[in-house]
Image (cartoon, rainbow, N blue to C red):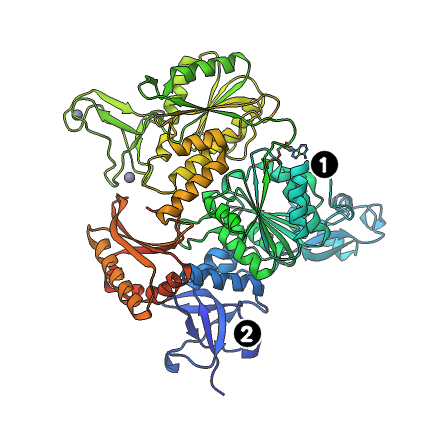
């Protein structure tokens, strides 16, 4: 019989598997796909995942090395997750080993046992009492026994010091048979028996009920529903009631949310509603907690799993439903390494595991709306706010030829003054941090250019520095112009810091609170700001898109959008979609309680058809218009894109590599007889130089997915081998959402 060969996925960018011999003492029959092995790799030892066992290798047998150690007695990944990773690597043209690295908890990648941690617990034995005569002269042991007796489920060994228990006394008690030790899983949380609900469910309104019933009817198999509900229409209530159905059926629910929404409020809402074991997976949990949550989900010891993008890869013992909240949110797309989209993968996973998926948003992506229109997704709409809250009114304020005071027009100031005087709050949105987006010499036109990027540096006055938001470079602002020595240097444009400062001067009697990445970077500062806002006194909130997500500001009745124009004439074809979503989401923060809200949008393009549609007829009318423009231009979702990006330290190197890659692609298309694929480029990236590197890109646009992927599979191995690839860093982005 030939020697069995193990084919392993290793954490390497190379799109191939690596062959090894089995470890010396391991019978080949005990090997299953998904098991981890420690193997020699160059001069290092790394952990790989077994993909298959074959009987032949292209590598001569003498050169094959044995794996060092088998780390698992059974595969830590259930077959469903293994299959999802294979699909992901294939679709995104990514190394399988690196795909596992992104999908699995860090500790598993490092070889940690894939079983929940065991811990020792100290218990009082039956009948043992502190009055035991053997303890009459041992006061410390007596006290220790008393303390332990207060914990009916035992005391974890790791908590002894905290309870001021000495190990010596415990050992003596153990010898006397008054204590016993039990070893069990430390994180096993018991659910209280009985109802899944801790809180009664709200009676659903008509639209909610229709959506709920439609989704419930399909809970037993694959289906995708798009719940398009205006902000505050009670989408979350629908989620909660569906999850209740899933729990009653003995299954688990996976809830994905954008990073920024993972406030304590979200978790609190689930915890208040359910008597259930909730596992949390997001970037703030440490590696051990992440592994524990992952294992609990895998072993059916978590009922509800809540997490951000990568939680999509959480295995579940009996999955019943996947919910993706705010499905339009860009944070579902990973922008580095494995460039996957959690929404798209959620649907793939659901199809593989025969599960329902629920996508929810007030402003669904054009992709999802298109899928709903073409019948692939069930579209369920909630058009009314739940309870008594009314929808906000929109007003386009034409600022052409009006003077702006730090970005704020006169009529807007008046509206703010009225709102504050009525005892209500004002929210001012602008999507720029810092004081001003650049510093300009009024005499010669010098601008604060970043030395490493094709971009301006932002003036941050509070810290007295110029900061590049693209590469992180910082400098002290010059006192005089570096070119002409003039001292007439002026900040141009308005950032949140400047608006904050100016509003403080215009409205000295009211507090101005700034909410952006700079003002909330300290731990707890966001909570503090929210607490102040929730007290409800009149004030002004100034902030970036952080304000647009997830929060309820019931006392805000005026929302001001200082500048909507960036989204209307950007080179990026998705800019208008993003701007519309942002406007609607920001507007949704207003007037959520009794008082109706008003939204004022400052613009130089007050008659722009997309803006008119959006403000007069709402998001869905906008989306229809935007979709027909996309169709006419042959842009996604009516075509499919792949973007090959490259960057290099010397100018021209990236283009040279992309030229070669482009040439290979042309030849392959001819050889394979593929048509309907356009190669656009190579061209310099919209920001050609970034962090000191020169960047270029090649865009592939196809009217059908199949030929594009056929080309990719043949092309990538060739691209990998190109000699010019050594001088560059390159990456492939399938279904890119940013084209730079
Ligand atoms: P969304 O997720 O669409 O923004 P939520 O589910 O958060 O909306 O609901 C907004 C507010 O309306 C919440 O305070 C919620 O408790 C309340 N609400 C939701 N559904 C109902 C209902 N059927 N009856 C009364 N209040 C409701
Ligand atoms: Zn100058
Ligand atoms: Zn820079």
Q: What element carries label 2?
A: loop
- Residue where numbered disc 1 is placed: 203
Crowding at mark 1 (Cα within 10 Å: few <14, some 14-19, many 20+): few
- Residue where numbered disc 2 is placed: 31
Judge whether 364 appears above or below 134 on screen. above
User: Mark 2 to mark 1: distance in Å?
Assistant: 53 Å
Q: In which quarter of the image is residue 545?
A: top left
Q: Is mark 1 on a helix, strand or loop?
A: loop
Q: Which of marks 2 and 1 is nearer the N terminus?
A: 2
Residue 520 at least partly seen: no
Q: Position of residue 699 (x, y in %)?
A: 31, 53
Is 677 left or right of 110, judged from the image as shown?
A: left
Judge whether 101 appears above or below 272 on screen. below
Evaluate if marks 2 and 1 touch, with contact meaning CB atoms under 8 Å apart.
no
Ligand 1 within 8 Å of disc 1? The answer is yes
Q: Position of residue 285 (x, y in %)?
A: 54, 46
Question: Along the line of sight, which residue is nearer the eye, 216 or 629?
Answer: 629
Residue 445 at least partly seen: yes
Is 276 left or right of 105, judged from the image as shown?
A: right
Crowding at mark 2 (Cα within 10 Å: few <14, some 14-19, many 20+): many
Q: Which residue is drawn at 69% across and 57% down?
A: 184
Q: Where is residue 123 in the image (x, y as percent from the top left)?
A: 75, 52
Is 604 left or right of 650, judged from the image as shown?
A: right
Q: Residue at x 80, y 46 (%)?
A: 137
Q: In which quarter of the image is residue 80?
A: bottom right
């Amino acid at each position: 019989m030939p020697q069995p060969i193990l084919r392993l996925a290793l954490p390497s960018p190379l799109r191939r598997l690596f062959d090894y011999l089995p470890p010396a003492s391991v019978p080949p029959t005990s090997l299953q796909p998904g098991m981890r092995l420690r193997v020699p790799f160059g001069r290092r030892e790394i952990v790989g995942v077994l993909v298959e066992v074959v009987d032949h290798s292209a590598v001569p047998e003498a050169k094959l090395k044995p794996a060092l150690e088998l780390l698992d007695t059974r595969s830590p990944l259930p077959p469903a997750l293994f299959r999802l990773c294979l699909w992901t690597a294939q679709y995104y043209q990514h190394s399988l080993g690196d795909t596992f690295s992104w999908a699995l908890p860090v500790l598993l990648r490092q070889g940690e046992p894939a079983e929940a941690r065991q811990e020792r617990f100290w218990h009082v034995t039956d009948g043992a009492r502190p009055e035991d005569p053997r303890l009459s002269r041992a006061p410390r042991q007596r006290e220790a026994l008393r303390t332990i007796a207060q914990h009916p489920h035992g005391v974890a060994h790791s908590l002894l010091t905290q309870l001021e228990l000495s190990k010596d006394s415990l050992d003596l008690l153990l010898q006397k048979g008054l204590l016993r030790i039990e070893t069990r899983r430390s994180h096993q949380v018991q659910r209280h028996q009985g109802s899944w609900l801790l809180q009664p469910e709200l009676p659903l309104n008509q639209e909610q009920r229709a959506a709920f019933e439609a989704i419930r009817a399909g809970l037993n198999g694959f289906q995708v529903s798009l719940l398009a509900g205006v902000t505050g229409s009670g989408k979350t209530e629908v989620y909660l009631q569906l999850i209740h159905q899933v729990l009653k059926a003995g299954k688990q629910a996976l809830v994905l949310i954008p990073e920024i929404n993972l406030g304590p409020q979200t978790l609190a809402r689930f915890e208040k509603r359910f008597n259930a074991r909730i596992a949390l997976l997001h970037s703030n949990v440490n590696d051990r907690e992440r592994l524990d949550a992952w294992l609990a989900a895998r072993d059916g010891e978590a009922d509800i799993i809540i997490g951000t993008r990568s939680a999509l890869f959480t295995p579940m013992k009996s999955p019943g439903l996947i919910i993706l909240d705010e499905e339009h949110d860009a944070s579902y797309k990973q922008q580095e390494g494995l460039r996957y989209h959690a929404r798209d993968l959620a649907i793939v996973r659901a199809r593989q595991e025969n599960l329902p998926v629920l996508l929810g948003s007030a402003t669904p992506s054009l992709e999802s709306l298109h899928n709903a229109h073409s019948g692939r997704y069930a579209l369920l709409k909630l058009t009314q706010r739940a309870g008594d809250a009314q929808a906000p009114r929109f007003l386009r304020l034409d600022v052409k030829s009006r003077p702006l005071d730090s970005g704020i027009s006169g009529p807007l100031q008046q509206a703010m003054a009225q709102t504050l005087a009525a005892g209500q709050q004002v929210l001012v949105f602008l999507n720029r941090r810092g004081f001003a987006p650049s510093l300009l010499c009024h005499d010669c036109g010098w601008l604060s250019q970043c030395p490493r990027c094709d971009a301006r540096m932002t003036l941050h006055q509070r810290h007295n520095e110029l900061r590049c938001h693209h590469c992180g470079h910082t400098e002290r602002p010059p006192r005089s112009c570096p070119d002409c020595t003039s001292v007439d240097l002026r900040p141009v444009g308005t950032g949140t810091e400047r608006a904050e400062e100016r509003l403080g001067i215009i409205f000295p009697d009211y507090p101005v609170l700034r909410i952006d990445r700079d003002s909330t970077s300290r731990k707890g500062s966001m909570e503090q700001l929210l607490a102040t806002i929730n007290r409800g006194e009149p004030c002004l909130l100034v902030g970036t898109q952080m304000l647009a997500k997830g929060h309820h500001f019931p006392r805000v009745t005026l929302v001001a959008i200082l500048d909507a124009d960036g989204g209307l004439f950007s080179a990026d074809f998705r800019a208008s979609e993003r701007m519309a979503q942002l406007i609607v989401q920001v507007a949704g923060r207003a007037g959520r309680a009794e008082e109706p809200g008003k939204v004022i949008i400052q613009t130089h393009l007050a008659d722009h058809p997309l803006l008119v549609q959006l403000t007069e007829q709402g998001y869905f009318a906008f989306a229809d218009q935007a979709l027909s423009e996309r169709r006419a231009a042959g842009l996604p979702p009516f075509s499919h894109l792949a973007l090959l990006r490259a960057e290099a330290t010397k100018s021209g190197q990236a283009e040279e590599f992309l030229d070669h890659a482009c040439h290979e692609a042309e030849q392959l298309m001819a050889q394979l007889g593929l048509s309907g694929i356009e190669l656009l480029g190579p061209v310099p990236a919209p920001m050609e130089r970034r962090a000191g590197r020169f960047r270029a890109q090649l865009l592939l646009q196809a009217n059908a997915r199949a030929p594009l992927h056929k080309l990719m599979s043949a092309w990538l191995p060739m691209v990998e081998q190109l000699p010019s690839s050594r001088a560059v860093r390159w990456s492939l982005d399938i279904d890119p959402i940013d084209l730079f």
